[in-house]
Amino acid sequence: MAAAAGPRTKVTFRRPPLYPAQLAAIFGPERLGLIEASTKSGKTHGCMAWLLERAFLGGGNGKNYWWVAPVSQQADIAFTRMIRWLPRGTATAYRSHGGKRIVLFNGAIIWFKSGDNADSLYGDDVYAAVIDEASRFKAEAFEAVRTTLTATNGPLRIIGNVKGRKNWFYQLARRAEQGLEHAAYHKLTAYDAVQARVLTPADVENAKRELPERAFRELYLAEPSEDGGNPFGIEAIRRCVSAFAGGQGEPFVWGWDLAKSVDWTVGIALDKGGEVCRFHRFQRSWTDAKAIIAAETNAPALVDSTGVGDPVLEDLQRAKPGRSDAPIFEGYKFTATSKQQLMEGLMMAVHQRKIAFPDGVIRAEMDSFEYEFRPTGTRYSAPEGMHDDCVMALGLAVACAGSIERRKPVRIVLGGY
């Protein structure tokens, strides 16, 4: 940014250089951007550039732009760094009881606030905002910030290190990863920063040697620690992720989980080696869904036949009956007991690495899946507001493969004494 003297200030804005992954994560078109990031990966630097660009190019006449951190000392860091960035004559900084703020030459005001007291964040109209250190940020403070952007339709960037799985930031990031409307999910790891020469390989290797594995994975790889509640185990899930899964082999079995309400219809096929080789996820009318399922399924399939799934299954069986002794489509009704059995079969397949699946939405659902012990048995489900359709479809495919194995004829060899 360069300022020219004169009766009117003319400013040329030049975006600070950002590496490709950093640029894609922060400057995307989506209104809501969630970025789980390694320490020192440039998330703060990039979001400061994003907020400043929004204020310079989109605002004036007293429009408000917010940088909000869990506590005031953290907001101070961004405030001080931004003052250093700005050339003389382009802005004025204020520290007062009214709060820390930078007033730009065009009248836009960038405020630096604390999320300590959620009630103090309601009321203003805000045109763009950044929530920093989101995994340590209060859920009620996030809700307050979100309301300030409603009238303006302003965008929001939410950034932070990973800190376990039981916080709103982690859960919202998983929803964004699974396709939340108007949202985008990105991850910036230490190795992205190394490739961009923001960090050196020695920095990362030293941290790996000096830190506990849990801390290193969270702070440098943006991978959540296993903080309880996941039936598969985060490490076991990670071992099943394969870059080769997703379309190499031919389907041996299918699992189809049918949409309920706002859920997704998901179909997953496994090849004979247990790798995911086909994956479909969509929200369509029942007529369209049945046509897609019938057209795609060319191997034995277990289909969720719970509730509305029962007539869907009957239509599929009529459309593609198969042989009397080997139908293409068979139903699986979900009850508390049958769901527990299905998940226990999937757990065994994951722990024994009998299956492999690609990174992305399948892994995201597996990572966020939870179990809870109750007097009536174990309850398996996705956290509130999230989906488990991929988990169910994968479980159905594994169960279908197991059913075929059990139906194989047994060869009996008779021997004498």
Image: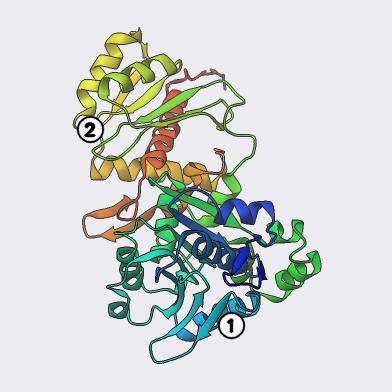
Left or right for 398, reference 192: left
The type of residue carrying mark 1 is Thr
Nearer to the camera, 191 or 400: 191
Task: Please indicate, yes or no, whether residue 383 appears anywhere in the rendered image.
Answer: yes
The quadrant in which residue 136 appears is bottom left
Q: Which amino acid does label 2 sit on?
A: Thr
Image point 40% across, 69% down: which residue? 61
The colour scheme is rainbow
- The numbered disc on residue 80 is 1
User: Can residue 38 be seen here?
Assistant: no
Front of the two marks 1 and 2: 1
Q: Callout 2: helix, strand or loop?
A: loop
First-in-chain label (1 vs 2):
1
Position of 374 relative to 138 (above/below): above
Q: Quadrant of the N terminus?
A: bottom right
70, above or below 159, in the image = below
Determine the residue located farthest toward the bottom in the rendered image: 97
Tag 1, which secondary structure? helix
Q: Which residue is drawn at 41% across and 42% down?
A: 391
Q: Mark 2 points at which residue?
A: 306
- Crowding at mark 1 (Cα within 10 Å: few <14, some 14-19, many 20+): few
Q: How many marks?
A: 2
In which quadrant of the rendered image does the C terminus lie? top right
Position of residue 239 measured from the top left corner of the image (x, y, whole percent): 60, 48
Report which quarter residue 241 is drawn in.
Answer: top right
In the shown orientation, is residue 380 left or right of residue 56? left
Residue 247 falls left or right of residue 100: right
